[in-house]
Image: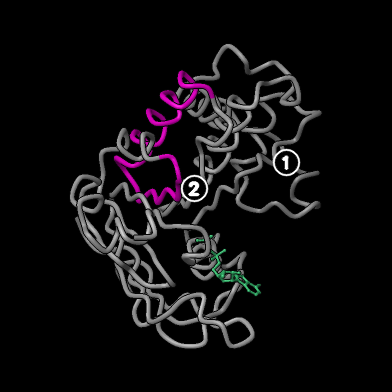
Amino acid sequence: MSTLLEVSGVSKSFDGFKAINNLSFQIGEPEMRAVIGPNGAGKTTFMDIVTGKTKPDEGTVLFGEKSQSLLKLTESQIAQAGIGRKFQRPTVFEDQSVSDNLMMALKKDRSPWAVLRFRPRREDHASVAKLADEIGLTDQLPRKAGELSHGQKQWLEIGMLLAQDPRLLLVDEPAAGMTPAEREHTTDILVEAAKTRAVVVVEHDMEFVRRLNCKVTVLHEGSVLAEGTLDHVTANEKVIEVYLGR
Ligand code: ADP
């Protein structure tokens, strides 16, 4: 496993408050990683920094084997470089079919002009079929995305991100609002995706994190408090203190 993302000495303050405080850590390729931490730990700010939504005050964020700095890139350049992000709320095109949603997501260029001119090729249909299989929505392909269940919409959106073939996929609370069976399916999709890329899952649900069966990074006050297996970090005195307020 080689290093894909290297965050070193990153800090970010908002109105004098350090949301991220000298944060350093690495993500490998391929790797599944869970990031946990109490509210306000800096998880969202960390994702905002990696995806270019927020620029840090200090530190470096390097990506890929050429250690490309992400700090001077725009959000769309970072996406083009191979970093995808899934927000909690799915943003699928409700009036379009599942198939068309996946088809459009294959396009690297999403400008209105490129979208209008888009004509699917034979290999695009094959890619849509493969993606639908990966997310378990093959039998839903003709349906309008707006008719899907909450869980199915989330899977569709994961499929749309996978269509861009990101090297690093950041996923924010993928299991929120899902039934146990939907959570299980979500785990399967993410575990499969992490076989060929880096997947970073920010999650509150410890049962979900347990099923991911991966290295866990605990953030607290904008820094790494502990790192290791879930059993290892949940046995850590500092982690117990932070979570239980002892
Ligand atoms: P988490 O996602 O772990 O709950 P966040 O990254 O959202 O944590 O927030 C970390 C801290 O930074 C919080 O105390 C939050 O209030 C603060 N913060 C985050 N973004 C902003 C912002 N744009 N302006 C001011 N404070 C912010």
Image quarter where ligand 1 lies: bottom right
At mark 1, the secondary structure is loop
Label ID, residue 171: 2
Do the residues bearing badges 2 and 1 touch, measured as CB atoms within 8 Å? no
Q: Give the amino acid at mark 2.
A: Val
Task: Name which residue lies at 43% across and 72% down.
Answer: 222
Residue 229 percent location from the top left of the image: 21, 48
Residue 206 percent location from the top left of the image: 37, 40
Task: Name which residue lies at 35% across and 51% down.
Answer: 198
Q: How many marks?
A: 2
At mark 2, the secondary structure is strand
Answer whether residue 100 is magenta in the image: no
In the image: residue 190, left or right of residue 39: left
Residue 103 percent location from the top left of the image: 64, 33
Stretch in magenta: 179-205
On the rendered image, what quadrant is the C terminus found in? bottom left
**In which quarter of the view is residue 64 placed?**
bottom left
Residue 216 percent location from the top left of the image: 29, 52
* Image colouring: one colour
On the rendered image, what quadrant is the N terminus found in? bottom left
Q: Is the residue marked by circle 1 packed among few (<14), some (14-19), or many (20+) residues within 10 Å?
A: some
Nearest the camera: 50 or 43?
A: 43
Nearest the camera: 114 or 78?
A: 78
Mark 2 close to ligand 1, CB under 8 Å: no
Note whether 68 is above or below 119 in the view shown. Answer: below
**In which quarter of the view is residue 61 placed?**
bottom left
Label ID, residue 118: 1
Task: Name which residue lies at 71% across and 16% down.
Answer: 143
Task: Name which residue lies at 49% across and 22% down.
Answer: 182
Note whether 44 is above or below 204 in the view shown. Answer: below
Q: Give the amino acid at mark 1.
A: Phe
